[in-house]
Image (tube, helix red, strand yellow):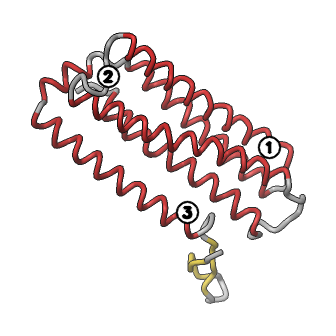
Amino acid sequence: MTATPSRVRRDGRMGLRRIPGEPGIWVFAILDMLIFAEMFGIYGWYRADHYEVFQNAQSKVIPAFGLAYTVILLTSSWLVVLAIGAARKGEIELADKLAGGGLALGVSFAVLKLIEYGIKLSQGITPVTNDFFMFFFVMTFVHLLHASVGIGVLAYMRLRIRRLTPGAPSGSKSFGVIETCGIYWHMVDLLWIVLFALFYLRG
């Protein structure tokens, strides 16, 4: 674990606050988001060059799907935050249930995304239909792969929660692993919010 100075205590000495999760997850998250940022930039460049094509194609995207995904992932992330908080308090059973709820919503997201893909394909819309749908399928599918990994991560998070001993210090290795799992899932959530704005919000 790593710790960083956070504030000066009343006795004048510097207090230390531990950074949540393992340091490696932060490096991974930053690098991964930089890769997505590059894709977002390329998308924006193509959209500016083919504005009418993108606008017309976007009208074929169902906003209700995007809203549903967003609500699902935000709720899932909220449950994960509550699960970590409950685990810190030694409420293992509650933490397990909350993490299970987050996991179930993650699975719901993946299933709903596959349903949307099926609808698009049944309408004859594919990645080669036009540039907009090339970006739509590629970028949302890459995100779906991240979410699928995240589902496995949340399942592992539940396993680690169940192995916790009530009263264990929150700075222990087990808590670090649990926090790392949560950070990964929050990254998936954050990336989705940008994708939602790009593909489902018309303007």
Type of amino acid at the residue the image marks with label 2: Thr
- Residue 190 appears at what percent x and percent y? 46, 45
> Circle 1 is placed at which residue position?
96
According to the picture, the residue beneath numbered tag 2 turns out to be: 126
| Residue 13 falls in image quadrant | bottom right
Of the two numbered discs 1 and 2 on the same chain, state the one appearing first in sequence.
Answer: 1
Marks 1/2: CA–CA distance: 40 Å
Query: 167 above or below 11?
Result: above
Q: Which of marks 3 and 2 is nearer the N terminus?
A: 3
**Disc 3/disc 1 C-alpha distance (Å):** 22 Å
Badge 3 is on which residue? 25
Q: Where is residue 54 in the image (x, y as percent from the top left)?
A: 19, 26
Q: Is residue 119 left or right of residue 73?
A: left
Numbered disc in front, either 1 or 2: 2
Q: Position of residue 42 (x, y in %)?
A: 22, 46
| Residue 165: image location, x then y, percent | 89, 59
Mark 2 element type: loop
| Depth check, front residue: 113 or 129 | 129
Q: Which residue lies furthest to the front in this view?
A: 128
Which residue is rendered at x = 26% and y = 26% of the image?
128
Does 148 sit left or right of 121 as displayed?
right
Give me the residue at 65% from left, 44% from top. Answer: 152
Q: Residue furthest left?
A: 49
